[in-house]
Amino acid sequence: MEWIMIFCFVAGYVAITLEHTIKLNKAASAIVAGVLCWTVYILGGHDAHEVNHHLEAHLSEIAAIVFFLLGAMVIVELIDAHDGFDIITQRIKTTDKRKLLWSVGFITFFLSAVLDNLTTTIVMVSLLRKLISDREDRMKFVGLVIIAANAGGAWSPLGDVTTTMLWIGGQITAVNIVKMLILPSLVCLLVPLWLLSRSVKGKVSAPEKVEGVYNIASTPYERNMVFGMGLGALLFVPVFKTVTHLPPYMGMLLGLGVMWILTEYIHGGKDDIEKGPKSVNHALRKIDTPSILFFLGILVAISALESVGILRSMATWLDETIGNVTIVGVLIGFLSAIVDNVPLVAAAQGMYTLEVYPADSFFWELIAYCAGTGGSALIIGSAAGVAAMGMENISFTWYLRKFTLLASIGYLAGVAVYVLQHQLFG
């Protein structure tokens, strides 16, 4: 039964990677693979009540991510509809590709630590659409955004869901993880950023606006108000989580609700033609729903593998076969590019107690770094990559050819820096 589930997952994975070759939307492949994995699980002789209980438990976690993604996309779309990103793009004067590449890399890196890698990617991809008209150039910048967002999220307890898991679980502390991982994470970005900057030259050109009934310019008041409220709503999410201890998607939905009220108030006296493109209803229709469904399908499939114990068995096998915690951590990072890093970290938390590896030990810090940044090796290996893949319609094979090697070199360089740092300073 386990092998049939693995076959269903691998078949879906291959269909996703060959999306443009077989001309089948990746969301369809992911959804079918996810449902088939659970179907095989429940028909494999397991108690139906137990399987449904597992599904409901995972569904609550998956729904939290989907609602978070939905809320963030709508807020970003509202900011974009009100020309809010012009406030930033007007301050970015350079059109030189290399200078812009470095600027985008550092902005993404530090913004991801404050927000999280998923929200930051959505914001930065939307911003790049305002700055770069050429699709091939823009995709290179988006590829860098994926690496920078994952690297920036790894050293902050709020930047990546796995770092947050370890923080909540008591395996790491907030101040220490920032102190120990900021340099390795920065190296994880700087190495591919430097290599990529050597291969680009020339200038970028911004896309021209097409004026029309569905592109009515916002007033400075509307633009500043929606941009300020939208950015504030995104920044409020980690604060809301810290204060209330409710999951992040609740803070995101609260921000969306406030934005909805605000935009209805701003455009209350306008006719439907003028108000329509700037309303939440229009934003909900405009966001990339297939990418959300793709995310749903992938998480459903992986949750089935986790429920049957395949991922935990994989982690245990790594530990028993290899033994060296550094190599195990590195391999977990690369595995997180294939399957979700959340169940891998959860498996590691279940395998090792705080008596074996105390809080802020070498192992937990390494796991936080590797699980947070290793997913950059493949575009579907992280939430940031999945979001960017859907928003810019980047193919799996394009990212594999252009960025997998760059991301892997940066990832391993960061591991080397962390190990050296630990040997020198403890």
Image (cartoon, helix red, strand yellow):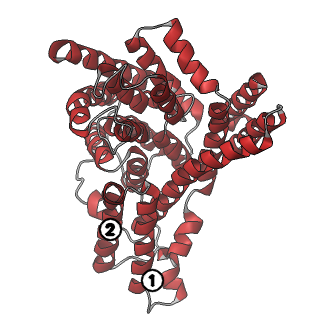
Q: Which residue is mark 2?
A: 227
Q: Which mark is residue 159?
A: none
Question: Mark 2: which amino acid?
Answer: Phe
Question: Mark 1: which amino acid?
Answer: Glu
Q: Quadrant of residue 157?
A: top left
Q: Where is 29 relative to 209, above or below?
A: above
Mark before the other along the chain sequence, 1 or 2: 2
Q: Position of residue 160 (x, y in %)?
A: 39, 41
Residue 169 seen anywhere in this rendered image of the structure = yes
Q: Which mark is residue 264?
A: 1
Answer with left or right where residue 324 lies relative to residue 394. left
Q: Where is 126 relative to 421, above or below?
A: below
Callout 1 crowding tier (Cα within 10 Å): few <14, some 14–19, many ≥20: some
Q: Quadrant of residue 105?
A: top left
Q: Position of residue 245 (x, y in %)?
A: 38, 55
Q: Which structural element holds mark 1?
A: helix
Q: Position of residue 218 (x, y in %)?
A: 37, 77
